[in-house]
Amino acid sequence: MNRDLLVSACKENIFYKTSFINNDFDKLEKLMNLTLAANEKFNLTAIKDEDSFRELMIYDSLLPLKYFDFSNKTVIDVGTGAGFPGLPLAICSSGNFTLLDSTNKKIKHICSVIDEISIKNVKPVTARIEEFDNDNRESFDFVIARAVAPLNILVELVLPLLKIGGSFIAMKGAIGLEEIELANDAIKKLGGKLGIVKTDYLPESKEKRILIEIKKIKATNKKYPRQYGEIKNKPL
């Protein structure tokens, strides 16, 4: 996907309901170049060529903007890795973004990127999600996770972070719908309710993408989340 196709696809499929600044695409290009350059040293992402990066890392990261308005909201990207989807979303919206990852080299990379591009609405944090939950319960309007873990594991990790009335957006591939059924019991137990489920296709590769919203309708019991090993071995 070249830059022109990225711009036209975003205008047609993502930004058709919202306003955006053309300068955002310059920042997205710079984000790509900085990430690919750092990738040669730190192995931040498996995507190494520009055309694939634009579609699989940038366009894909922006898909939540098609359905959700992050303006003036608190948003946390859990397991952000090299900063995706959090950095593209922060460039193209006015929400206040926390980017959380347990790998310090990735957070250091994000810090250098936000300084280089001058992204003001991002706070990078190095921490494990279970530890971060302890001091940040019910602090966010939105939680986003992309390619982090199966849904029945993710919900226990992230729902404690949401304010009541907030939404968790799970960004999934083709098998996302299958994960919902396995997570239904956990969602209810943790104070959540299934919201919208949207299917999209990437414009060039035609890969399937599923966005799953889980709304927080009541407080999560404070005994959750458990330690990650227990969550993984015995999902709710």
Image (cartoon, rainbow, N blue to C red):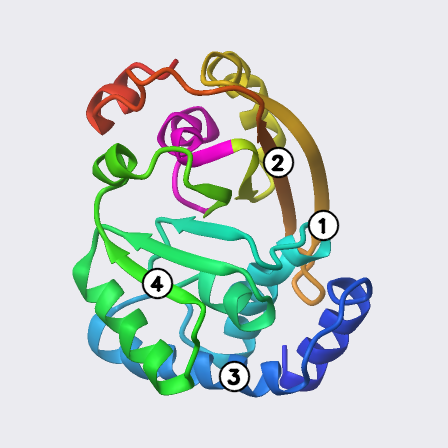
Q: Badge 3 is on which residue?
A: 27
For residue 143, above or below residue 217? below
Label 2 neighbour load within 10 Å: few <14, some 14-19, many 20+: many
| Most foreground residue, 54 or 158 | 158
Please state which of the two labelled residues, at mark 4 or mark 1, is closer to the viewer: 4
Secondary-structure class at tag 3: helix
Secondary-structure class at tag 1: loop
Left or right of 156 on screen, residue 93? right
Residue 192 seen anywhere in this rendered image of the structure:
yes
The earlier-in-sequence mark between 4 and 1 is 1
State how far apart marks 4 and 2 are (Cα). 23 Å
Q: Which mark is residue 213?
A: 2
Residue at 35 percent of width and 33 percent of height: 137
Please state which of the two labelled residues, at mark 4 or mark 2, is closer to the viewer: 4
| Most foreground residue, 17 or 55 | 17
- Residue 199: give x, y in percent of width and height: 72, 43
Amino acid at dot 1: Tyr
Amino acid at dot 2: Glu
Q: Badge 1 is on which residue?
A: 67
Residue at 34 percent of width and 78 percent of height: 113
Amino acid at dot 4: Lys
| Quarter assignment of residue 8 | bottom right
State how far apart marks 4 and 1 are (Cα). 23 Å
Secondary-structure class at tag 4: strand
> Which stretch did the figure color magenta?
146-163
Residues under numbered marks 2 and 1 in contact, where contact means CB atoms less than 8 Å apart: yes
The earlier-in-sequence mark between 4 and 3 is 3
Amino acid at dot 3: Lys
The earlier-in-sequence mark between 4 and 2 is 4
Label 3 neighbour load within 10 Å: few <14, some 14-19, many 20+: some
Q: Badge 4 is on which residue?
A: 123
